[in-house]
Amino acid sequence: MSNVAPLLQVKNLRVEFPTRRGTLVALDDVSFDIAPGEVLGVVGESGAGKSMTGAAIIGLLEPPGRIAKGEILLGGRRIDNLRYEEMRRIRGKEIGAIFQDPLTTLNPLYTVGRQLAETMTTHLPIGPGEARKRAIEWLEMVGIPAAAQRIDSYPHEFSGGMRQRVVIALALCAEPRLIVADEPTTALDVSIQAQVIALLKRLAREKGTAMMLVTHDMGVIAETADRVAVMYAGRVAEIGPVREVVKHANHPYSAGLMASIPPLDRRVERLAQIDGAMPRLSAIPKGCAYNPRCPQVFDKCRTYRPDLINAGTTQAACWLYDTEAPRG
Amino acid sequence: MAAAVQRFLDSDLWWSFRRSPVTVVSAIVALVCILGAVLAPWIAPHNPFDLASLNLSDAFKPPAWDEDGAAEYLLGTDDQGRDVLSAIMYGARVSLLVGLSATIFATVLGVSLGLTAGYAGGHVDSVLMRICDIQLTFPSILVALLVDGVVRAVLPREVHDQIALFVVIFAIGISEWPKFARTVRGSTLVERNKEYVQAARVIGVPSLRIMFSHVLPNVIGPILVVATLNLGLAILSEATLSFLGVGVPPTQPSLGTLIRIGNDFLFSGEWWITIFPGVALIAMVLSVNLLGDWLRDALNPKLR
Amino acid sequence: MADPVPMLEARDLARHFDVSRPFLQRLLAREERRTLRAVDGISFTIPKGTTLSLVGESGCGKSTVARLSVGLYGPTAGSVRFEGRDLAEARSLADQRRRMQMIFQDPYASLNPRWRVKNIIAEPIHAFGLVKSKGEEENRVAELLTQVGLSPLDGEKFPHEFSGGQRQRISIARALSSNPEFLVCDEPTSALDVSVQAQILNLMKELQQRLGLTYLFISHNLAVVRQISDRIGVMYLGRLAELAPAESLFKRPRHPYTRALMEAIPDLDMTGRERIPVGGEVPSPITPPSGCAFHPRCPLANERCKRERPEMKPAGDAMVACHAVEEGRDDAMPMPAIARTAA
């Protein structure tokens, strides 16, 4: 992938939340790329900053949050400093967004067909007739039975799983180059989840769309993503090919996280657990944010903050892989 | 105690209070009104009810800054030679007493019934809420007039004069409780289904105790807002009733009574007798309402 | 099942909810009353000191069973017996009520935000009059906090000062404070992050061993359930599809729905196995399909399945409600990959 120009570049992104008790740094020095057609999974515990990264990219940070440093580039063009109107156009046309709760995306007052058609006529050079035809095709494509009849239904007339399919159709119909999906299957049951994931994967592959998939469900990542970024306390702890990160994580946090997933194929007496909890944004420890919980901590971790460095198969923000200064 | 003060100074409530100039000004105005009213017997320049000190030759004195005014009577005097400023302070005392008492009465009644309706649900809920609906279709002034009229018809005049204050309080309170009941019922319905209430039910905590020790502390925020906004309304209702002559007894004139009395002289040039009590009423009600608005926004996590 | 009297026994348990619109609206729209059959006739027993888990998708009625089992709901039909005694009767006695407790799903809603942690934990102690003095109570709360891995100093704080996992520990401490023997756990880890989930599951297992607790464990996550259960019941639309010893369920799932569920779980080991989604949607429990509720989604369904509702029948060491299993037609559906690799 190294010889393909990346579609999305996030460089040293820093997001701050000014509060009356001082400025909280929600994201710090977050950098990654996504190539065309690639699926990047972003995982981490709640509060690690994974959803916030997605929100920053689509320009929907909740106030008073703001980008304080860094750049976000889509196809080489900076999009982090655009005005609201410009960003809104990009959000429909070039970036599609899928959220956990489909009801936040769908307008309850309009039929799904109208919402699909409007999105397409706004962003694509087609007329209303063509848009309606394509809307039916999209509904068929996302697996909604009797699409031609259901196109004039309102969102509340669909079940949860069907609604999320409509959202997927809505996110994809303007043929964006990037999809930011934030926990797209979390609200769905396992049996429905599998259908939705399979659909997303297939469509992204067919259309060559890049995807940033934010989720806490490692199973979904394992079967969907090409690469994974593991986030901890607002920073990327490790990033690398999905197989490596899930099965042979280099960062002690990623390793601990993967080990704590209960296995389905056997019963273990005691699950591996990471003691303690992720620090609050207002109390991130000095040095490596993970150092108080890390089983392999040494002096340097308590003082200096590691950047992402080469850790063989992946890149990890961990002093264990610092070859220049030996540990101790 | 010191810890409690410290906690308050650290709280979001204090922070949002200091950030809003309108709120700070309202609080100061409200405080001045309340202090002036409460401390009237000690700080008012004159005692308007001390007939011995009244001098008819001082009647109809304009405010002090007018060339005919006297420094002794800052806001002038009325037809009896009573000091308008002192009358306002004493009048505000009555207005505030009635407003507060009526609000407390409405709060206690509304919160109890709302909690019961929300927590018990079913038929109890339906019956109580229908009563609310019916009550809400009558303007509160009408209810107050009705209660007042019934009491007047039933009780002899001297008894009525003695309890007139309570009649007004009851009349205003009874017309305001549905607002509290509805607010509390709504929040109770939400809280009732929360798991901490279920946890208490699993242990077997009696319903009454769950309602008051678990649910009530969590619905108190909206109640405070409604109560504050309602205080302004209650003061206004009292003023309206007194203006119409069915409110507090003439021996205890409130701001409304003062406005009515002064109204007779408005067009004969003695404007100050009615305008100043009016301004005092507006200042009091407006500041309390603005405080209520702020409280509502400050307690609403979505707007923060 | 050495103990003849189980901790909990449910027999033909059902709970229906009236979900009709208000009377006047119903009258105007000429609608029938609508009944949601959340739980529609299920039977199980939980022997003392063991864990029974109920799994299923949302709306299958598993949480309703949890609430029926501690008496938060009364049954519409059937019965729940707590150590041989009718549950309603047991709950009228404080010393019996003390023995059952519940842990909830949402760590943010299960603790009263206005109460200090020490008072939250002490509520059951008060309610059952378990201590004689204030000092004794403080000691007990400190002991409970330590037992769940928190510091005794945490008692002074309010719930919002804790993370989700810590709150769930507080919930557990509250549940343990009345020295219960039977704990109903309604999705206790599903709102938690995976690393915290492991902490809580380990804690719950530890407490069970140390205190000899009996658990009714509700979850939608098969992997979690495998770690904690002795027996597992799979629920679908208010009924049990299959009830089997835990290992047996994973080695040889019998009901087509159980197999489909296992096949639908994402493959973390990336063995290249494609997950096979269960087709279709979960039907509404207000208008459940005729016959076997799973028949519209079942690859083995035939005429009989559409017509006749299957009853729980023994199959090996399991109980299964499926005509295909009973008739021996189930070989037509392959075992899920997980069962194949485990066997």
Image (tube, helix red, strand yellow):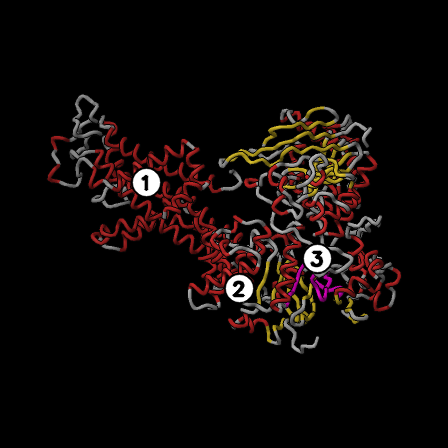
Q: Which marked residue is nearer to the observer: mark 2 or mark 1?
A: 2
Amino acid at circle 3: Val
Using the rendered image, report if marks 2 and 1 lie on a common chain. Answer: no
The answer to whether residue A133 is visible is: no
Could you say which disc has been placed on residue A8 in the image? none
Location of residue B31 by image quarter: top left
Give the image location of residue B143, x and y in percent.
37, 48
As drawn, the residue found furthest toward the bottom would be: C4
Count residues near mark 3 (Cα–Cα under 10 Å), then give few for <14, some for 14-19, many for 20+.
Answer: many
Residue C104 lies left or right of residue B229; in this view the side is right
Q: Give the magenta-colored segment's residue range.
A: C214-242
Cα separation between marks 2 and 3? 25 Å
Circle 1 chain: B
Is C71 magenta? The answer is no
Horizontal side of residue C198 vs C112, given as left or right: right
Q: Quick one: A294 or A265, which is closer to the camera?
A: A294
Labelled disc at residue B240 = 1
Residue position for label 3: C224
Numbered badge on residue C177: 2
Tell me if B167 is positioned left or right of A224 in this view. left
The question of residue C218 being in magenta is answered with yes
In the displayed orientation, state which residue is furthest to the top.
Answer: B67
The percent coordinates of residue A116 (x first, y second) are 73, 35
Which quadrant of the view contains residue A287? top right
Q: Position of residue B232 (x, y in %)?
A: 36, 40
Q: Residue at x 36, y 36 (%)?
A: B27
Residue at 48% across / 68% down in the picture?
Answer: C128
